Amino acid sequence: MPSATSGPSAEGVRAVDGVALAVADAGRAAEFYKRVLFFETISDRELPTAGSRVRIVRMRLGDDVLELVQDPSAGRSSRRVTIVVNDLDQAYLWLRRQGVRPASPAPRPDWNPETDGMRMVAFNDLDGHALALVQFSTDSGAARWRRPTDRVFLGIDQAAINNGP
């Protein structure tokens, strides 16, 4: 991902390639995302830098890309990553079986009109990054989230990513 000073201006950006998170141990983080959230590893590489080792693991969930960046000089990411699921109750039970503790109450069984047609539960990854699972109702969210599938974890909702917890 280009930096703010060396990359294209905001008006030249047409799409987001993926989301990058700074992590303490890229291998450990990649294992969590693979085992718990069903991401697949695309690449795992080290970049030479002066005096330190930067490791970047690129992972995919559906059509979306996540980069786990192990860089001793990087600060912690403050972005929340929203992962779309097709069955929030099943995904929530899976998280609990994997030992993941939610950071929000268990999802309500009914659709709350105040949530704009979605159900959500928040949790954190091993590095403390804020994550959320979201299930859209049948008439909300992007059309790609409503395609028939037998997968529970579908991808990253770029529209729901925000800065801050």
Image: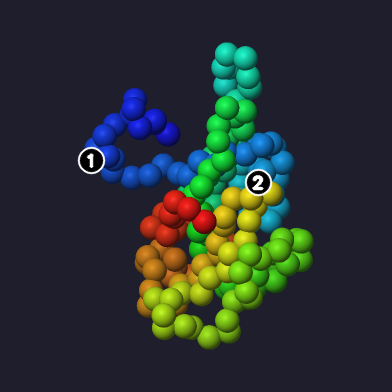
Q: Position of residue 135 (x, y in %)?
A: 50, 71
Q: Position of residue 87 (x, y in %)?
A: 57, 73
Q: Residue at x 37, y 65 (%)?
A: 142
Q: Give 97 or 75, whichever is nearer the viewer.
A: 75
Q: How is the image coloured?
A: rainbow
Q: Is residue 60 left or right of residue 157?
A: right
Between the C-alphas of marks 2 and 1, the distance is 32 Å
Circle 2 residue: 127
The single residue placed furthest to the top in the displayed view is 50
Q: Is residue 164 left or right of residue 32?
A: left
Residue 70 sits above or below residue 119 on the image: above
Image quarter of residue 102: bottom right
Label 2 secondary element:
loop
The single residue placed furthest to the left in the displayed view is 11
Q: Is residue 9 left or right of residue 48?
A: left
The single residue placed furthest to the bottom in the displayed view is 110
Q: Residue at x 43, y 76 (%)?
A: 115
Q: Amino acid at mark 2?
A: Asp
Q: Earlier in the sequence, mark 2 or mark 1?
A: 1
Q: Which mark is residue 163?
A: none
Q: Give 57 or 104, whichever is nearer the viewer.
A: 104
Residue 98 sits above or below residue 16 on the image: below
Q: Residue at x 63, y 19 (%)?
A: 52
Circle 1 residue: 11
Q: Position of residue 23 (x, y in %)?
A: 62, 39
Q: Amino acid at mark 1?
A: Glu
Residue 28 sits above or below residue 90 on the image: above
Image label count:
2
